[in-house]
């Protein structure tokens, strides 16, 4: 009798683990941007494209957060390359604020699981706008003033990665035809 219960429990845990792995794999595929995922069985009132967009937005916010942290770490490692301690301090302050936006953006997406309707898009768009303003501030105050070519290349690489994530979010939350801001490579 106990053996049957253990077997059923093991099967149940195996199924739960398989569902977990499939969910993570699906999220990774959707956020990769080059794979198409078909979403089925959505809750009433939520359409499949909203679910797919939610997964893509969630992945992009994760990349944004990781890239923001990498940019901040890059700036910290290059303290001696900044033209002044004031520009270094202002850059870190702006990057710290920019880093802190990822947490509420992630939390917000968790409060609306698999639902990326117009309201969700607008809310995430507000986080995006704040992040773009702070990124611009950080790069203008100090990061663009780094003179050492190798050090500047490291900061530029981290900034490019961050901008790519923000560009993905921009495409998800802004109406089609909205011009790309200059900080994301637009005019």
Image: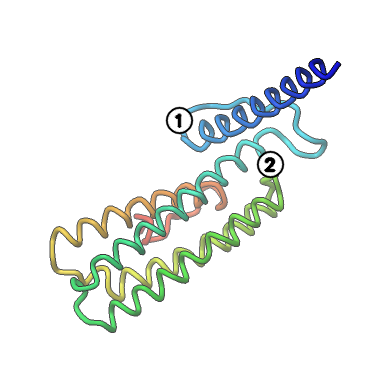
Crowd band around label 1 with a 10 angstrom C-alpha radius: few (<14), some (14–19), many (20+): few
Crowd band around label 2 with a 10 angstrom C-alpha radius: few (<14), some (14–19), many (20+): many
Nearer the observer, 81 or 50:
81
Residue occupying the point 64% across, 51% down: 109
Q: Is residue 53 above or below residue 7?
A: below
- Between the residue at mark 2 and the residue at mark 1, the CA separation in whole angstroms equals 20 Å
The percent position of residue 58, horizontal first and vertical second, equals 57, 46
Residue occupying the point 34% across, 55% down: 185
Nearer the observer, 147 or 36:
147
Determine which residue is flagged by label 2: 114
Determine which residue is flagged by label 1: 34
Nearer the observer, 131 or 181:
131
Which quadrant would the N terminus be assigned to in this image?
A: top right
Q: Residue furthest bottom?
A: 86
**Mark closest to the chain's N terminus, 2 or 1:** 1
Q: Residue furthest right?
A: 1
Residue occupying the point 52% across, 34% down: 28
Left or right: 109, with 142 as reference point: right
């Amino acid at each position: 009798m106990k053996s049957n219960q253990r077997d059923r429990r093991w099967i149940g845990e195996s199924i739960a683990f398989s569902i977990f792995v499939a969910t993570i794999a699906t999220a990774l595929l959707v956020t990769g941007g080059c794979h198409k995922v078909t979403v089925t069985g959505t809750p009433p009132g939520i359409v499949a494209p909203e679910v797919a967009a939610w997964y893509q937005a969630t992945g992009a916010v994760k990349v944004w957060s990781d890239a923001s942290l990498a940019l901040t770490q890059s700036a910290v490692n290059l303290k001696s390359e900044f033209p002044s301690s004031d520009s270094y301090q202002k850059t870190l302050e702006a990057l710290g604020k920019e880093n802190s936006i990822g947490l509420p953006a992630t939390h917000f997406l968790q409060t609306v699981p698999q639902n990326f309707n117009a309201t969700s898009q607008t809310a995430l768009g507000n986080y995006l706008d704040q992040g773009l303003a702070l990124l611009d501030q950080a790069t203008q105050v100090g990061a663009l003033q780094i003179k050492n070519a190798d050090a500047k290349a490291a900061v530029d690489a981290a900034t490019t990665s961050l901008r790519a994530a923000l560009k993905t979010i921009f495409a998800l939350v802004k109406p089609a035809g909205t011009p790309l801001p200059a900080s994301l490579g637009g005019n």
